[in-house]
Image (cartoon, grey):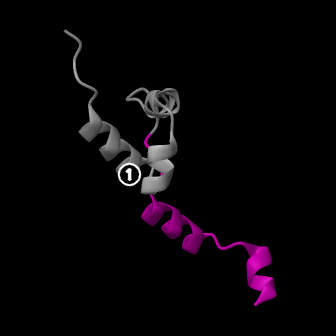
Amino acid sequence: MAEPFPWREAMRFGFGTLRLSPDQFWSMTMHELHAAMEAHGSDHEPVLNRRDLQNIMAAHPDQHAQQKR
């Protein structure tokens, strides 16, 4: 008998790791979700989270954006 699809793991990955909205998550095909999960496998570098990106942006502000202010 086939194992049931791991919805809890898929949702945790989609909402937590990819930060997808519910509409984005539920509109993905199984092939797209599987490819995204493979791309973020343990052999890959960790994905940058929002807080880390904001810290990097604060430490290294865009020169062009500062000139517009």
Q: Amino acid at mark 1?
A: Phe
The residue under the point 51% across, 39% down is 28
Q: Nearer the viewer, residue 40 or 63?
A: 40
Q: Position of residue 20 (x, y in %)?
A: 46, 53
* Picture residue at 30% right of the left edge, 46% below the top: 12
19 to the left or right of 67: left
Residue most toward the top?
1
Please state which of residues 65 and 28 is positioned toward the viewer in this rendering.
Answer: 28
For disc 1, the neighbor class at 10 Å (few under 14, some 14 to 19, many from 20) is some
Q: Is 68 contained in the magenta span? A: yes
50 vs 23, nearest the viewer = 23
Residue 44, position as x, y percentages in the image: 46, 31
- The residue labelled by disc 1 is 15
The spot of residue 10 in percent (x, y) is 33, 38
From this viewpoint, which residue is outermost toward the left? Answer: 1
Instruction: Give the residue displayed 75% in from the left and 78% down from the top.
Output: 65
Check the image and name the residue furthest to the bottom.
69
Range drawn in magenta: 46-69
Decide if residue 67 is on the left or right side of residue 26: right
Locate residue 19, reporting x and y percent. Answer: 44, 54
Residue 29 seen by the camera: yes
Up the image or down, 65 lies above or below 35; here it is below
Figure quadrant of the C terminus: bottom right
- Give the side of residue 54 with respect to residue 1, left or right: right
